[in-house]
Image: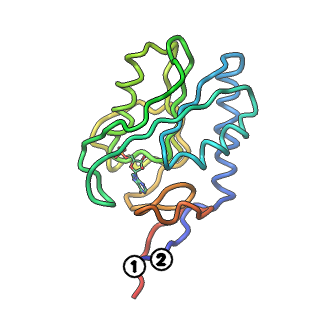
Amino acid sequence: MDQPKVIITREEISNKIAELATQLRKDYREKNPLLIGILKGSFVFMSDLVRAMNIPVEIDFVRLASYGTSKDSSGKVKLIKDVETPIKDRHVLVVEDIIDSGLTVRFILDHLSLHKPASLKFCVLFDKPSRRKVEVPIDYVGFTVPNAFVVGYGLDWNEKFRYLPDLCILEEQD
Ligand code: IMP
């Protein structure tokens, strides 16, 4: 059974979110931004981020499915829950937990662009740049993480470990 080993603590995550929120507060003040979280993984990050920003924002969620094995996606992304708020002429900030191949972000960028938002930016807490298959513009990044499967702080492996407050890697245990 794989055991989670902490690589980024809850305190480090909280400090980084405070930094991101300070920048976002400056960039989005008076713009009534719409934050769109990508379910399920971003739910913890989103809830901490909006409270740290502490300015008026609206929120919505999309849900995507990517097909493949539990630790590697096949490259096919499908929308299973669309955004419910009209986004035309809105300042949209997409909130994502982790970017790996970049395919999810590329899909949502293309999808939301069709509806002509006033602006469309991406905020990602964890970035695995070594795994990128497609280049995508990321405007706000929390941490760069190594090429390993990570769990905790909302991220799962087969729906397990989302509840862990720290970011962990799974280590094999005999
Ligand atoms: P991408 O489309 O390959 O960039 O993958 C993004 C999605 O894959 C994220 O929204 C996560 O749901 C999932 N994912 C990628 N890497 C990890 C990981 O290390 N742990 C947990 N989920 C991951």
Is 14 above or below relative to 80?
below
**How much space separates mark 2 and mark 1, taking CA atoms?**
6 Å
Q: Residue at x 35, y 45 (%)?
A: 65
User: On the image, numbered disc 2 is attached to which residue?
Assistant: 3
The residue depicted at 25 percent of the width and 44 percent of the height is 75
The answer to whether residue 161 is above or below residue 3 is above
- Which residue of the protein is positioned furthest toward the bottom in this rendering? 174
Name the image quarter holding the C terminus.
bottom left
Horizontal and vertical percent position of residue 79: 36, 36
- Tell which circle, 2 or 1, labels the residue nearer the N-terminal end: 2
Residue furthest right as drawn:
54
Disc 2 crowd rating (10 Å Cα; few below 14, some 14-19, many 20+) is few
| Label 2: which secondary element | strand
The reply to whether callout 2 and callout 1 are in contact (CB within 8 Å) is: yes
Q: Residue 2 is drawn in which quadrant?
A: bottom left
* Residue of label 1: 172
Q: Amino acid at mark 2?
A: Gln
- Residue 172, quarter of the rendered image: bottom left
Residue 124 % position (x, y): 51, 41
Q: Is mark 1 within 8 Å of ligand 1?
A: no
Q: Nearer the viewer, residue 97 or 163?
A: 163
Looking at the rendering, in which quadrant would you find the N terminus?
bottom left
Q: Is residue 98 left or right of residue 22?
A: left
Q: Position of residue 31 (x, y in %)?
A: 66, 17
